[in-house]
Image (tube, coloured by chain):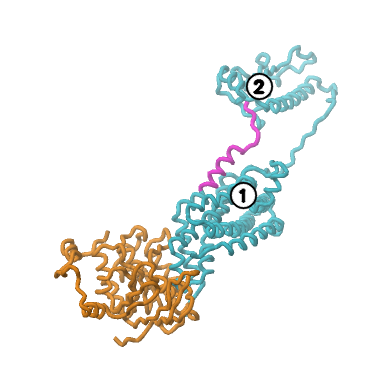
Chain colours: A cyan, B orange
Amino acid sequence: MKYSNTRATLAIAKASFRSILRSPSAVVFSLAFPLIFILVFANIGGGGVKVDVGVVKGTDTLSIIYKAIQKTTIVNLVTDQTAEEMKQNLSKGSLDAIINIKTDGNNGWTIYPPSAGRPQKSPFAIDVQYTSSSQKGSILKSVLSNIIYQINEVFQKQVDGKLGVFSPVELKETIVTGREYKYIDFILPGQLGFSLLSSGVFGTAFVFIGLRLTLVIKRFFATPVKRYSIVLGEAIARIVFSLLGALFIIMVGHYAFGFTLIHGVVTVLNMLVLCAIGLIIFMGFGFTISGIAKNESTVPPLSNIITLPQFLLSGTFFSITAFPTWLQYVSNALPLTHLNNAMRKVAFEGAGLGDVTHQLFILLIWGIGIYAVAVKTFKWE
Amino acid sequence: MANKPIITVKNLVKNYGDFEAVKGISFEVYEGEIFGLLGPNGAGKTTTLEIIETLRNKTSGEVTVDGFDIETDADNIKKRIGVQLQAAGYYPNLNLAELIVLFSGLYGIDKSPTEMLEKVALTDKAKAKYKDLSGGQKQRFSIATTLINNPRIIFLDEPTTGLDPQARRNLWDLIREIRDTGTTVVITTHYMDEAEVLCDRVAFVDGGHIIGIDTPDHFIDQLVATGFERAKQTKGANLEDVFINLTGKEWRES
């Protein structure tokens, strides 16, 4: 019977895959951590700016002004605090403002007699207290003045009837319906990239140094198996595991947090191809570390040297445009930055792999570089 | 025994840098025998074994295994031998049955885990992890992995080190069974009582040289013939006999 290298490779891939599934650290790093980060950041970053406004007891919650404020998405009305609590929270800055809306008498403005004679007194009085400990007061200010302007304008028309009074400035607002770029659209690709980086670097380094030190590889060499089968089998197992993990994260992101997948399945497939490319490059770092490290306890510090800077500088949590220019140069040199960028383009902008050739090219350069080093440093025994 | 050589080693030399580990040794192993390589630590036993197993390159000399040269036919030799390494581990997180499946794949042979585990009486441990086995069970499992490819020769490097007397005897029985099915066994050990009862022939290795090859009986007779006497008169039994007698021959599983 002819000896089959493919069969030996697949036997190793199968064994390695089983082993990964049973190793708690692999599952925690590849699935649990990214999901926890996504859960946390998707919720705190969710709706952008929120202005917390305390509502004084006795405010006319039926008034048109209150309802208009309620409708705006950026104002969060707090109604369950006592006057004392509100005062304290305002001075601490955990409330951005306190509002009190009074209506004159029982008359809503709509049934206010549109008589020729104007009312002597404003039908509404809004009492707002801002605080110096929060910057968001000005946001509320502009929200309120916008509401007041609209109400005043309508009121004016009603009162003046057909007298033809023109507003000096007419504001015309239109909202363009577009795709909402949610924070999940930013955070998920970053987490996916980082999960691949950890799995590729830590996972590969630990597995190979372990197999080497426990003489598992030496025992393999006493069988007809080829060296490339061992590396290839391990790589296949890790890629399959990571792609399943990535698919799971994308699905959770999409269905639970509304992660945008422009072209649906095609987008997912493009993302998985990017994941595989990224993982193969990151595994090169793992091979190198397994060769340099003397024993298993030197693997984590060496791996952290590779992963931590990229964790912070590659736009995993926030855009690198927030960095000073000199730091952006560093960020733009890191492979994870380009994987993340490519992933976001594919997922949110609907780009195909042909549209991210710039990113792929930089990843390719990293791949060639790191595997050149890995070949030199890798040790079998 | 027909005394047909299955392994031939001629003037084998192995240098590690300036250090000569093996200094030109020659010997033959006959088909169907249990051959013992004996000698102190650092004598070059393991190095010699690993060169024959194609795991290490020789510096010079000639080695043929079942008619194949280790230099040109390493792949064919690997298919015909079974190797148990000193202190080797197994793939992490897999149970014994899964490890047998893995090795079957590496050898490109279809063997059921049950069949292999039966040979070494470990069928009830099929779902156990290697690291959870007792010393004797570990060695028996290692031997099972060497038998997967129906080898012509198996190499066992100190298989009984660290085992209790019962487990040791149990392993001897297993090794004899393997020999009786026609497989040649090459073994290293530090226990001379073991070599005496188990090996058909032994070679003494010291300082990278072979200083004698013969059957254990011949070696002992020769020494006695020189007028050698033990300092202490041998009794009809020794302390190990007492141990076995008191604790029973039955091998314990844990």
* Quarter assignment of residue B13: bottom left
- Residue at position x 60%, y 51% in the image: A193
Q: Could you tell me which secondary element the residue under label 2 belongs to?
A: loop
Q: Amino acid at mark 2?
A: Thr
Give the chain of mark 1.
Answer: A
Q: Amino acid at mark 1?
A: Pro
Residue denoted by label 1 = A189
B79 shown above or below B161:
below
* Quarter assignment of residue B7: bottom left
Asked if residue A44 lies left or right of residue A18, the reply is: right
Would you say residue B108 is visible in this rendering?
A: no
- Give B128 or A302, whichever is nearer the viewer: A302
Residue denoted by label 2 = A131
Asked if residue A286 lies left or right of residue B95, the reply is: right
Q: x and y percent of residue B248 in the render?
A: 18, 63
The mark found on residue A270 in the picture is none
**Magenta residue span:** A32-52
- Residue at position x 45%, y 83% in the image: B68
Q: x and y percent of residue A283 in the render?
A: 57, 58
- Residue at position x 64%, y 55% in the image: A267
